[in-house]
Image (cartoon, grey):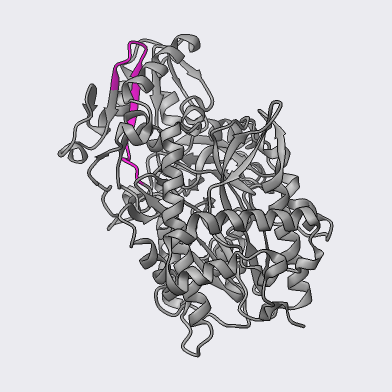
Amino acid sequence: MDMHTLVDHGTRLAGLRDWIAGQGLDGVILTSADAFQNEDAPEHDRDIAWLTGFTGTLAHALVMAEGAVFLVDGRYGIQATQQVDGADWTFGHIHDAPLGDWLRDRAAARNIGYDPMRWSVAQMERLRDKAGTATLTPCDDPFDAIWSDRPAMPQAPLRAMPEAEAGRSAGDKLQWVAQALDGLGAGVWVETRPDNIAWLFNMRGGDVAMNPLPLSFAAITAEGAAHWFIDPFKCKDIRPEGVILHPIEVFIPWLKDQTVACAFDPAFTPDAVEQALGESRHAKGLVTIEKALKTRAELDGFRRAHLDDAVAMAHFGHWLSEVMRGEDRPDESAAAAQLESFRARSDAYQEPSFVTIAATGGNAAMCHYHPPAQGSARLSRDAVFLCDSGGQYAGGTTDVTRTYAFAPVGDEVRRIATAVLRGFIALSRAQFPDGTMPHQIDALARAPLWDMGLDYDHGTGHNVGHNLLVHEHPHRIGQKPNPFPLRSGHVLTLEPGFYEADVWGIRVENQVEVVARDAGFIGFDPMTLVPIDLGLYDLDALDAGERGWIDSYHARVREAVAPLLSGAVRDWLIAATAPLDQRAPQLSESR
């Protein structure tokens, strides 16, 4: 971070403190989320990045006259200290020492402002419960006043998701919501998640890069009437049938006029919504849970997308194997661009599903590292290379991570990498009762690392949307309780890893479908069809079941993908998926 950047962000922080004083407040709390609780916000709402320089997707902050606190989770701990000026900010862990604790300890008897459109009902309930004597007061968006060249809100046009791809009509979904309202004793469902709205109306947008969403709000009545609060410019080329359109600015006033009970999901609905309503009902995850259960058409689309992705990843794997033999090796940014070019060869490809994490050596220890376009690190034969990437395809969304070794690795790296692989295989092979909660199986992936006194500070898996968000709710495989049962038809990732700060990192990730097994049990069936680079691992340390799983998975990859390839790329794939007892010795297995 250069001094110009430090001075600029320090000036911006001073401007925020001036605004706080002008409002008669003692401080303000900030969140990286926008009014729609998106993980990736539009540029208009990336105010924490503008204020601090932090480019990650999750952060909370407390700013007061005498200090400022910056909180991130385990994915971003290293990144935050590199991007945010430690002279101005105190760093903390968003889960181990959450914002409520800082409010209680640092803001006792103080009046702290918050933007009620940016914090959800559930978040504010937790903060008020934990904040002790601190008072939390709704306030205006401070960045409207202090960010003079703030970007405008995006206006990307809508596009339809064909019913043949969705597998269910918008009318059927709206009727389902109307029936659910009867059970809730409410007359209106208020929906503030753009991915849920896109799913309900069988529409997609483009307001945030790599997230095919129309930023908007919606309300569905018990009679099945649908009200969509959206910038009318987005609807100039397509108007969903049977939906009443309103300017997005009238959303809160419209809610204030309602005389019936309105229901919503408190986990994602802005606190301003509850403040606007006379009578409300909470229904956690209503639309989110229904959306997560994929239709047969959606699952078929996912499989087509993963075949296209497998072809691109095969070309990438072959390209890596060739280019790393030479002296003119690419940097991280060039490698990410090359992978993007392979994906773009598919007619069904639209855009990445997130910014590619192409990380060599110590950069791989930052879970969500993004290589700069200029000056990114050059790939080295002596360093592992972690590549986490995905695509948005017409039929589905993909997310895959592979970690590559181009030369022998040290014994300790091999030992740890093998533990990660064994955890990945254990979770991939597992079967468990239908309705198991995601957190109940997380330990299967961590146990081999735990046996070594090691762990990783991120979740083990998440839902994936159907041409929607790559990080979809509600399911999270992780150590925190996640009270949403797993059912056949859910789509998730499995992605254990390990990270040694400034030295190296590893992650192995497949996207999987939850499928029915025998006698009331379920398990995972891989959708990802990409060879696992085996150069990092001590294959002799694997037991027969683990070796059998690798051979079975690679046979499936070979059978599905090899017919779609030709020449040297096909030869590479066949060699990369060869049975373990037939594999030619690799450099990385030599001693």
Q: Is residue 207 left or right of residue 469?
A: left
Q: Residue 52: percent from the left, percent from the top?
A: 47, 61
Please determine whether, in this image, residue 371 is positioned above or below residue 439: below
Instruction: Answer whether residue 29 is magenta in the image.
Output: no
Q: Residue 357: percent from the left, percent from the top?
A: 50, 64
Please determine whether, in this image, residue 152 is positioned above or below residue 219: below
Quarter of the image with the C terminus in it: bottom right
- Which quadrant of the figure has residue 423? bottom right
Q: Residue 369: percent from the left, percent from the top?
A: 52, 65
Residue at horizontal 67 percent and vertical 78 percent from the top:
586
The residue range painted magenta reads: 212-226
> As rendered, which of 223 and 32 lies closer to the eye?
223
Residue that protrudes farthest toward the left in the picture: 236
Residue 63 in view: yes
Residue 332 in view: no
Residue at horizontal 47 percent and vertical 63 percent from the top:
313
Q: Is residue 522 left or right of residue 529?
A: right
Residue that protrudes farthest toward the bottom in the picture: 327
Please determine whether, in this image, residue 405 is positioned above or below residue 199: below
Q: How many marks?
A: 0
Instruction: Answer whether residue 224 is magenta in the image.
Output: yes
Determine the main secondary structure of the stretch shown in magenta.
Answer: loop
- Which quadrant of the figure has residue 382? bottom right
Please determine whether, in this image, residue 51 is positioned above or below residue 283: below
> As rendered, which of 437 and 572 lies closer to the eye?
572
Q: Residue 584: percent from the left, percent from the top?
A: 67, 76
